[in-house]
Amino acid sequence: MMNTHVAEDDIREGVDRETIETVQAMAGKYKYGWETEIPTEYAPKGLNEDIVRLISEKNGEPEWMLDWRLAAYRRWLKMEEPRWAMLTYPEIDYQDQYYYARPKSMAVKPKSLDEVDPKLLATYEKLGIPLKEQALLAGVEMPEGERRVAVDAVFDSVSVGTTFKAELAKAGVIFCPISEAIRDYPELVQKYLGSVVPQSDNFFATLNSAVFSDGSFVYIPPGTRCPMELSTYFRINAENTGQFERTLIICDKGSYVSYLEGCTAPKRDTHQLHAAVVEIVILEDAEVKYSTVQNWFPGDEDGKGGIYNFVTKRADCRGDRAKVMWTQVETGSAITWKYPSCILRGNEAQGEFYSIAIANNAQQADTGTKMIHLGKNTKSRIVSKGISAGRAQNTYRGLVSVHPKASGSRNYTQCDSLLIGDKCGAHTVPYIEVKNNTSRCEHEATTSKVDDDQLFYCRSRGMDEEEAVALVVNGFCKEVLQALPMEFAMEAQSLVAISLEGSVG
Amino acid sequence: MAVLQAKQDALAARIAGLNLEHKGWTAEPRAAALARLTAMGLPVKRDEYWRYTDPAVLTAAATPAAAPVPAQTPAFAPIERLKVVFTDGVFDAAASDDLALAGVEIERLATAGAKDIHWAQGLYGQLETRGQVPVERPLAAMNTAFATDGLLIRVTGRAEKPVALIYRHESEGSDAILHHCVKVESGAEFTLLESGAVAARYNTVLEVDVAAGGHFHHIRTQGRDHDRRCVTHLFARLEEEALVKSFTLTASGRLTRNEVILELNGDDGVAHVAGAVMGEGAAFLQDDTIFVTHAGERCESRQVYKKVLRNGATGVFQGKILVKQGAQKTDGYQISQSLLLDEDSNFLAKPELEIYADDVKCSHGSTSGAIDETALFYLQSRGVPKAKAQSLLVLAFLAEALAEIEDEAIAGDILHRLELMLGAMED
């Protein structure tokens, strides 16, 4: 168990001993902190051209892919790590990491899920993601066949298995690990990879371009509504290993997909690096919903351990009336550096961003979005809810840019911050750049603490303080929770409560 | 490092002709400022704090020429005031009133600075130094190091009338650096007015230290001279129950950067800053950069900025509220709005909050858009001609900023000026 000592003088008036004890007992509860003991093979520690070649070779990649990786690597060497975010963390030693780790049993790729190491299957079972072709995420019971989710499970550097592939193929949908797509659909990958997040985009995206080991690939053909929700579940297991996955989603004309992403990692004393890239291409009249519940290990109360999460996510609405909706619940990670963006290139394209970022204990989050309005009559909406507790720092950073030609565009931004405790911080750094007058931009931000009257009311109805805070916070986040697909909404709601454990008193 | 070297080279070129030979009590703060400045170098557009405004014209070694525009309707003419005139950045004794006012000591920096000891020793450059953290302001440090003139004002009682600084720009190539210090003693009250263009290019610093219970009002108009390039700084520190209200009207000019740095040091302080901007033409760029720090408890701060932009004008707003740990019960408010009268105008805003205390109420809002078509239609349907209706709506838009001026006569004079400007636009 971790150190859950609360100093006497930190205890506020009006909190009874019992509450404090309950909180202490619950503090540091990270449900997914266990480790799977499985023989793992690693690439040698450190990063150099040979490692890049090795990753490419392990994935059996064609020449062009290796060249692409090497070009990115060479560029990365000349780049400087960005330090503009409101995050403080020690220098990352990029040579003190493993860039590739895979369970030994995955050396020969299993042909079907039946051949996958039972230990791996058990891991996902325990995480509440059964890799069986039936219904699905934890906590929701539904009649079989009603609502199904296809899962691509990524374990350290490799994809363990993808469910419902055959059924999806019937609809023409391609859903597979990106390593497979590079081999099987090279023309699609070559056409779109790096077209939304170019190799040169930023330090972490460039690093990812060089060393990404796996990830998911999705192609939805024209006029197709994907018959089920797609999901990727990322699990970091190996120690000292960075996870670099790459997701590429292509939604052809008039298609639709809802995509879910989940992530967890074991509890460890050392920090681990996670630098992912998600690229989404949306053509005419297509629509993508991308939902994330990020629950990487946040580190303990003293900020020891936890994932450093540096993620580049971007959707390019290339066609007219293309639509994208990002929804994220960020509860984990020691450091979050993440700005899912929308490029609204087509006329009447729409981008939406709904976010809940919770930072407790020593967590730091610097997250937000970019809405780039290029097409006429484009619309965007940003709803961001930041919650800080303990000694955490939580920053919303966003850009709304309306170009001169994006006439008749509309943006609405709302960022609310909630502070629980007097040692945490909540910050808002929006950039608003409007270059024509037929567009309207509105930005609102508020910062407040948990309302005493609301807490008192809940308490007077017999709730304990923890429950009361969780309820008030859930109310504060309601607009975002409502935007999540149902399975995620349930999970997110309980996550909000768990993440704030230990923050009261 | 190459960037810093370039900034330092630019600095060396910029200050080559400036005088550093100062005797008396200012020698020390000036030398310290030069050391700060040398370490920073001059700002460039790549700096985060200058991302929307290119400082090149402010930092260039050569002064860009600007034709003087004769004053038409002098600002604050109906207000009973003590006039102090600066022509091209130099105190003009002949045009000024006698510098005598009950409860107020007024001296020139250029002469008082040569003394060995002075009350302003504890103020000159001090607030500017504090204002360098967390954001570097090299141009303010440059001002402290090289200021050629300015006023040192100490207020011990309730000043019976405002002091009006009237700037006259007469020479096409004038380049001025003015530094004023105002110390408002405990319980004292003072109003400072500023109007006119200082020079073709200018850099001003106004440091205001308001002791417990003191009140300081500041109203300024920047207008008429179409080629103005300037950076102004207002640094104010407020002790317990002190009050500062500052309002600026900006019209015309090529580049106007107004920085305001407020520090609510004591408990229960009140600080309001407001600005109304009328921007016209593609050459126009006006930038309000505000930094409000709440260190005391139960303080109130308001930032109200309204910009009317047309024919390709650009308005910039960078505002920040920093609430330090322990600054409980803070009430911070910030609004920045722009009215874009045509397609080519730009509004660039970065309204920031940085909060380290939990029992606070802070909000900010920022909007931009065109004139409300429904309101315009309504007024026209009532028989108001379109141009007139538009002026009325512009005035209504600016009203919230104007409301921050406490003195009714002064507010009336500003409103009158705005009506004249809008009247000119109607034709």
Image (cartoon, coloured by chain):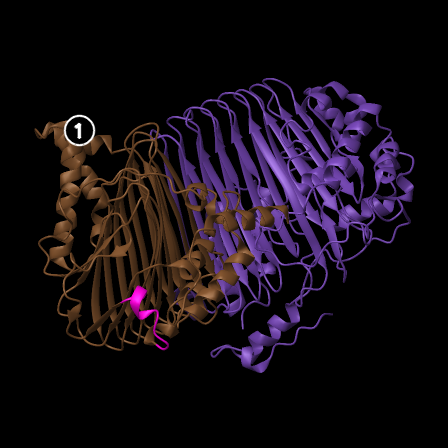
Name, please, the residue furthest toward the bottom. A8
- Residue B1 vs A151, above or below: the answer is below
The residue indicated by pointer 1 is B377
Residue A482 at least partly seen: no
Residue B101 at least partly seen: yes
Q: Residue A43: name its quadrant.
A: top right
Q: Residue A411: name its quadrant.
A: top left
Residue B110 belongs to magenta span: yes
Query: Residue visible at 27% across and 37% down?
Result: B67
Number of numbered discs: 1
Locate residue A480, reporting x and y percent.
50, 46
Q: Colour of chain A?
A: purple
Locate residue A139, reporting x and y percent.
64, 49
Image check: A153 left or right of A363?
right
Quarter of the image with the C terminus of chain B is top left
- Return the residue nearer the eye: B238 or B281: B281
Image check: A239 left or right of A295?
right
Residue type at mark 1 is Phe
Q: Which range of residues does the magenta coloring cover?
A: B108-117
Image check: B43 left or right of B244?
right
Residue B370 belongs to magenta span: no
> To which chain does the residue with label 1 belong?
B
- The chain that appears brown in the image is B
- Residue A235 vs B332, above or below: the answer is above
- Return the residue nearer the eye: A321 or B422: B422
Locate residue B388, reporting x and y percent.
13, 32
- Return the residue nearer the eye: A433 or B46: B46
Secondary element under disc 1, as helix, strand or loop, is helix
